[in-house]
Image (cartoon, rainbow, N blue to C red):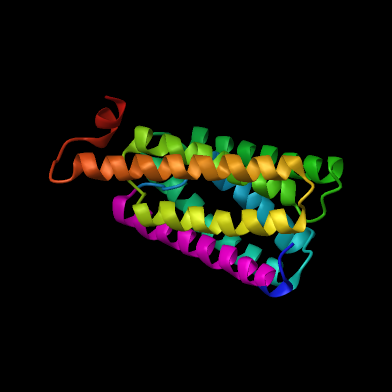
Amino acid sequence: MLSNQMELFLQYGLAIFWTITYILIIIQGFKDRACGMPLPAICANITWEFLFAFVMPFHPLQMIVSLVWLLLDCVILFQAVYFAKPKYPPRLLLPAIFSLLVIALLLHVGMIVEFHDQEGKYTAFGINLMMSILFIQLPFKQGLKGQTIYIAYYKMIGTLCASVLCYSLYPDSFLLLLLCLLTTIADIVYIVLIHRALHMTKGSNAQLVPTLRA
């Protein structure tokens, strides 16, 4: 068990590093005219943050952080819609996004009820794992567009802060421990992929996607 001061330090750490991650994703997204976060992850994030900012807030600091993240994720969702318009017509894209939002919201509520999880910890770490897995796909799908190595590192540091805090608060939960470990592994894999992509494209104008698939 960690001290109260260390737990508070980790809470601030995860809030700060994840906020920086979102901001960097937004900046790079506008720069590259591409969304730097997978759409299912955006929808899962937005619905979780809406629930715990407005419907089920359990701590003043958490409520403020969730609201900040919600606003940032809405900008990222705008990027996903705006930059996907040339590929997908709005009559297909918007219903798909709405469906993902509804599905994500219902799953959050279902898990909260099933696990009696008023703090949303199971859904939060489930989202973290899903995001980390989907981020691994991004370099193969769109190259380095919307991504930087700094995003990868800040994302992992924020998640590590949350994972250590979670283990301190719930040391007997095997499921949470497993989610934390798998997320960390996926984050490391993503960082390795970005490093490899940067190395292979350095000094070359070759496309990243076919290079990674080679």
Residue at 31% from the left image edge and 39% from the top image edge: 143
User: How far across and how far down the image is residue 108, in percent?
Assistant: 74, 44
Residue at 36% from the left image edge and 38% from the top image edge: 139
Q: Nearer the viewer, residue 90 or 28?
A: 28
- By secondary structure, the bulk of the magenta-drawn segment is best described as helix
Is residue 18 depicted above or below 189 in this figure? below
- Count of marks, rendered view: 0
User: How far across and how far down the image is residue 73, in percent?
Assistant: 54, 56
Quarter of the image that includes the C terminus: top left
Report if residue 144 is visible in the image.
Answer: no
In this rendering, position of residue 36 left or right of residue 50:
left
Report if residue 183 is visible in the image.
Answer: yes
User: How far across and how far down the image is residue 180, in percent?
Assistant: 63, 46
Quarter of the image that includes the N terminus: bottom right
Bounds of the magenta segment? 6-33
Q: Quadrant of residue 197?
A: top left
Is residue 182 depicted above or below 51 in this figure? above
Q: Nearer the viewer, residue 47 or 24?
A: 24
User: How far across and how far down the image is residue 105, in percent?
Assistant: 71, 44
Would you say residue 122 sits in the magenta stretch? no
Q: Nearer the viewer, residue 74 or 94?
A: 74
Residue at 40% from the left image edge and 38% from the top image edge: 138
Residue at 50% from the left image edge and 37% from the top image edge: 134
In this rendering, position of residue 2 left or right of residue 91:
right
In this rendering, position of residue 91 left or right of residue 145:
right
